[in-house]
Image: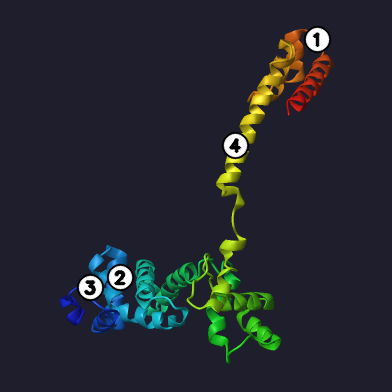
Amino acid sequence: MTRSLQKLDVALPLGSLETYVHWVNQVPMLSQQEELELAENWQQKQDLESARKLVMAHLRYVVRVARGYAGYGLPQADLIQEGNVGLMKAVKRFDPSVGVRLVSFAVHWIKAEMHEFILKNWRIVKVATTKAQRKAFFNIRQMKKRLGWFTQDEVNAVAKDLGIKPEVVMQMEARLNAHDAAFDGVEHDDDDAGHAVNFAPVHYLEDKRQDPALISESENWQQQGQQQLTQALGQLDERSQDILEQRWLTEKKATLHDLAAKYKVSAERIRQLEQNALTKLKSLITQEC
């Protein structure tokens, strides 16, 4: 039924990318009838061998698609690998009764996996998150007819062709032309280049909160404050201490009415006692400082 596919060795070749490309190009292509029979076997009987043959016969197409994304500076081998994942997803979901060839259906899945890989790995910070930004990201490079920035007329033309806002085109063009900067800067042997290192992000994005001296000072102030508070509370009468502890120093704070019932006085009286205790506590802490 499938000619030499029945004798095909499924072991992937080891070595260079060129070896792999040469190998996949030796896999015989399928006729429409052969593809239909294999797809029906997979869909109806879950025949893994049929699915394998469908995948193997289309590996060369994944390589062809990956070459179209060579301008993004990512390894071709990685792009091909991601595209192969998309191809397998396409084979799993392919419905032969629709009447289209597998390659027409699979191209969307192959490109989707490659797009996701490029967006995740092209830069440290993800450059495109919305559908409009993704569309602009993968089309602006191809639509540029010259070096340099788009003119306003070109921005409007690209936005119209892609069906997105001109602002998105300008935003994505700026991101495409930006470059990642080393946090610590790059050291050079010559003195002139060394001056640029002083403007590396490490010099103006320093997190002062992690300074050991500041952390130690903060801990000392906190410890000292706790000691002063404990000493000041010890100079209040027992009822005032209890009211402040119940109202401020416990996880489940008591209400004025709770304390009023406990001491058999009005809630207003508890409020007065609380304010008096706070005023005295503040005075005691100030004197100690």
Q: Nearer the viewer, mark 4 or mark 3?
A: 4
**Image x and y of residue 2, in percent:** 21, 79
What separation in Å lies between label 3 and label 1 (alpha carbons)? 87 Å
**In the displayed structure image, the side of residue 154 where residue 58 appears, left or right:** left
Q: Earlier in the sequence, mark 1 or mark 4?
A: 4
Residue visible at 64% across and 74% down in the picture: 171
Q: Earlier in the sequence, mark 4 or mark 2?
A: 2
Q: The N terminus is located in which quarter?
A: bottom left
**Residue bearing the label numbered 4:** 219
> Which residue type carries mark 4?
Glu
Residue 40 got which mark? 2
Extreme-top residue of the structure:
264
**Residue bearing the label numbered 1:** 265
What separation in Å lies between label 4 and label 3 (alpha carbons)? 61 Å
**Residue bearing the label numbered 3:** 12
Q: Secondary structure at mark 3?
A: loop
Extreme-left residue of the structure:
7
Q: Secondary structure at mark 2?
A: helix
Extreme-front residue of the structure:
191
Residue 283 got which mark? none
Task: Name the one closer to the observer, 159 or 170.
Answer: 170
State if disc 2 and disc 3 touch (CB < 8 Å).
no
Q: Nearer the viewer, mark 4 or mark 2?
A: 4
Residue visible at 55% across and 46% down in the picture: 212
